[in-house]
Image (cartoon, rainbow, N blue to C red):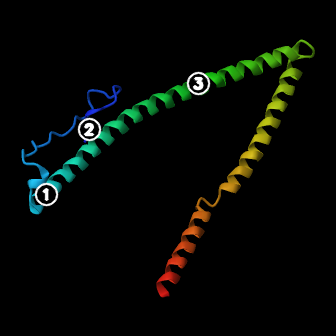
Amino acid sequence: MSVMNERPSSMTSAAPGPVPTHPAPQTPAQDKSAPELVQDITRLVPQLARQEIELAKAELTEKAKHAGIGAGAFGGAGLVALFGTGVLIAAAVLGLAEAMPAWAAALIVAAVLLVVAGVMALIGRRQFQQATPPVPTQAVDSTKHDVEAVKESTHR
């Protein structure tokens, strides 16, 4: 298969190469007997399957590496955003402290944050309740319907 030799340039050198094939006989396929053709197929199909599996392994390894790096970058971005949010909260407290005592400013900002957290918790709870039970009920019902339809068609 020609796809086997066309690996993406991003593949690492650790990726396995194509499995070498036996040289094809010089006889044209039209001159081969049916048993010879069957023998060729039984030899080449497992070989092709092994090559495809090796290619899939190499591709998945490369993709997993990129996914790991991406997950780490997202985690780092989340941590930096958390610190930035803390600084913004401190700035809000300091800004309100210009108009009132610092303790009152901190109390107001804390109350607002707790209200926001409570609303988010209620939204999350409602979404979680809609997700339970964790069974694909529509797919199960559809499958049951399909099984019943097949049973009815076989009884006719």
Task: Work out which residue is located at the far front of the displayed protein and give it.
Answer: 30
Please determine whether, in this image, residue 102 is positioned above or below residue 38: above
Q: Earlier in the sequence, mark 3 or mark 2?
A: 2
- Residue nearest the viewer, comparing 126 with 141: 141
| Neighbour tally class for label 2: few under 14, some 14-19, many 20 plus, Cα within 10 Å | few
Instruction: State the SS at label 3.
Output: helix
- Helix, strand or loop at mark 1: helix
Disc 3 target residue: 77
Residue 11 in the image: state x and y as whole percent: 32, 29
Badge 1 is on which residue? Answer: 37
Q: Earlier in the sequence, mark 2 or mark 1?
A: 2
Residue that numbered label 2 is attached to: 2
Q: What is the total number of numbered labels drawn onto the structure image? A: 3
On residue 51, which mark appears? Answer: none
Disc 3: CA contacts within 10 A as few (<14), some (14-19) or many (>=20)? few
Instruction: Write the residue at 75% across / 19% down.
Output: 88
Q: Toward which corner of the image does residue 21 lie, by quadrant? A: top left
Name the amino acid, label 2: Ser
How much space separates mark 2 and mark 1, taking CA atoms?
21 Å
Q: Nearer the viewer, residue 95 or 2?
A: 2
Of all residues, the one furthest to the right in this rendering is 99
Query: Residue 49 vs residue 139: left or right?
Result: left
What SS does tag 2 mark?
helix
* Quadrant of the rendered image containing residue 18: top left
Q: Nearer the viewer, residue 10 or 116?
A: 10
Q: Nearer the viewer, residue 96 or 55?
A: 55
Q: For the residues labelled 1 and 3, say whether their Cβ atoms are less than 8 Å apart.
A: no
Left or right of 1 on screen, residue 39: left
Q: Amino acid at mark 3?
A: Ala
Q: Residue at x 80, y 36 (%)?
A: 116
**Label 3, label 2: how far apart the Cα atoms are:** 42 Å
* Residue 153: image location, x then y, percent: 50, 82
